[in-house]
């Protein structure tokens, strides 16, 4: 079983719904339990550029040779800018673990995407392609390129200050602080 000691955790910053602007995305780079770097990019709110932005962010960074796993806080960034997790894994050569504190309401998400969001049917297809979320410990995950056992071990090892893995928790705090001037609340 692989141990995944070099992990990137990704989360977006706060944004105002209904405004088609760029949204800050922060990636934290962890080596074991130590934060070793921070990367930033933007994605278009409700757009279609999240996958390409993440691929560029990781592959053009100085940490690219060391990275072993990407964690996402949910499958979309900036509202409904859905990450094509399969393409992200293929183009970076890295396994991807999508983590959520609670089971998403997929029927509501499907309805919103297919009825209210331009290009939503294609975005819903990306969500469906990942399959159902599985409960691993206190969180729900979708995964590409790693086993359920490996995902469980990564979550157990990296959820130091609560249920959410530290790379994601830290990305959330940094993104919130950069956008609003201070971090807040739960991830």
Image (spheres, rainbow, N blue to C red):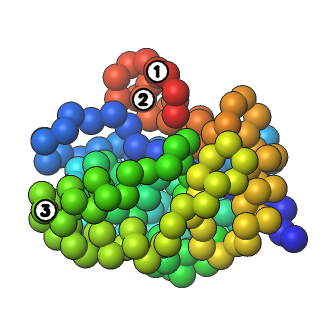
Q: Where is residue 181 in the image (x, y as percent from the top left)?
A: 38, 19
Q: Nearer the viewer, residue 105 or 59?
A: 105
At a point 78% along the width and 65% down the height, the residue shown is 150
Badge 2 or badge 1: first in the primary sequence = 2
Q: Position of residue 125 (x, y in %)?
A: 33, 76
At a point 30% along the width and 48% down the height, the residue shown is 78
Q: Position of residue 9 (x, y in %)?
A: 58, 49
Q: Position of residue 135 (x, y in %)?
A: 64, 54
From what the image shows, is residue 61 above or below residue 99?
below
From what the image shows, is residue 130 above or below residue 63?
below
Badge 3 or badge 2: first in the primary sequence = 3
SS label for mark 2: helix
Dot 3 corresponds to which residue? 115
From what the image shows, is residue 95 above or below residue 163?
below
* Residue 141 in the figure: left or right of residue 51: right
Dot 1 corresponds to which residue? 184
């Amino acid at each position: 079983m692989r141990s995944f000691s070099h992990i990137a955790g990704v989360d977006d910053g706060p944004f105002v719904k209904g405004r088609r602007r760029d949204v800050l995305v922060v990636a934290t780079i962890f080596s074991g339990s130590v934060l070793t770097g921070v990367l930033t990019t933007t994605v278009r709110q409700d757009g279609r550029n999240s996958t390409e932005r993440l691929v560029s962010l990781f592959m053009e960074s100085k940490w690219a040779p060391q990275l072993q796993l990407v964690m996402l806080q949910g499958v979309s960034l900036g509202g409904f800018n859905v990450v094509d997790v399969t393409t992200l894994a293929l183009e970076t050569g890295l396994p991807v673990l999508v983590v959520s504190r609670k089971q998403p309401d997929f029927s509501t998400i499907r309805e919103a995407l297919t009825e209210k969001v331009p290009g939503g049917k294609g975005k819903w297809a990306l969500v469906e392609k990942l399959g159902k979320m599985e409960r691993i410990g206190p969180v729900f995950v979708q995964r590409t390129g790693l086993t359920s056992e490996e995902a469980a071990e990564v979550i157990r090892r990296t959820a130091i200050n609560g249920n959410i893995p530290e790379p994601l928790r830290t990305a959330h705090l940094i993104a919130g602080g950069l956008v609003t001037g201070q971090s807040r609340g739960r991830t």
